[in-house]
Amino acid sequence: MAGAFGLRVVPRLAAPHPGGRRGGGGGGVRDASSKALNPATTNGVKKPNKQHHLWIRKETAGSGKKAVRLVDTISKLPNEREAVYGALDKWSAFEPEFPVIAAAKALGMLKRRRQWLRIIQVTKWLMSKGQVLTWTTYDTLLMALFMDGRVDEAESIWNTIIQTHTRSVPKRLFSRMILMYDIRNRQDKVLEVRSDCFLLVGLSVHYILDTQQ
């Protein structure tokens, strides 16, 4: 009888874990909560870090304001070297690094306003501070000297450029000098600049070939 009415003990099956996995201790809940608490993720996708780009925008905006302040300051000054240089020294006195970008933007603003004398003054002040001028700044300076009627001074700076940078003078500077001499009807100088251009191009080609051998 006992054998007929005996109970069979069947092992109890474990219920499926809510998270779909065993041994997680509520891992599915923790994953969801961690994603919700992490601001760097949205639906499991990591947000890009825009801190660097924001820094660039702030720096660009700051240099623009500095450039406007420089232009407004020197535009009200008399055409005296001491007054202009003193104002420029005060403008850059409290900067942790020399405001090169702001100065370049200021030169662009002065060029649009056709304030050629101020361009010459600011550029020479930059040179007196030991700042290396870019090709754009050199081009602006040559144009300002020409428009201010100081062709001899522009020619002197041009000769310095040719002697210092034997292989890297851009074509737009040659074009600037050719146009300047052509307007002045100095065809001998036009031919001289063109010959210098061809000579520098030839030197550059030979230099490239020598470095490749």
Image (cartoon, grey):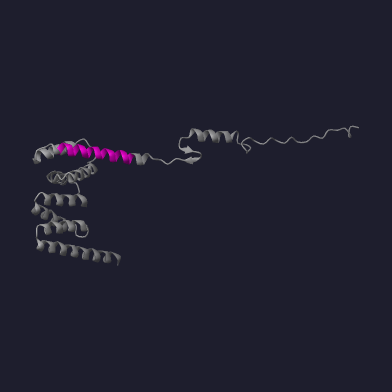
**Residue at 24% across / 37% down in the picture?**
65
Q: Quadrant of residue 125?
A: top left
Along the line of sight, the residue nearer the viewer: 183 or 108: 183
Residue 87 location (% of width, % of height): 14, 37
Q: Quadrant of residue 4?
A: top right
Q: Residue furthest right?
A: 1
Question: Where residue 15 appears, x then y in whole percent?
Answer: 69, 35
Q: Which residues are magenta?
A: 55-74
Residue shown at 39% from the left, 40% from the top: 50
Q: How many marks on residues? A: 0
Q: Is residue 116 above or below residue 69?
A: below
Left/right of residue 54 with respect to residue 175 in the rendered view: right
| Magenta-colored stretch includes residue 56 | yes
Q: Is residue 147 magenta?
A: no
Residue toward you, 180 or 157: 180
Picture quarter with the C terminus: bottom left
Q: Is residue 141 left or right of residue 1?
A: left
Q: Residue 169 location in percent, x, y? A: 20, 57
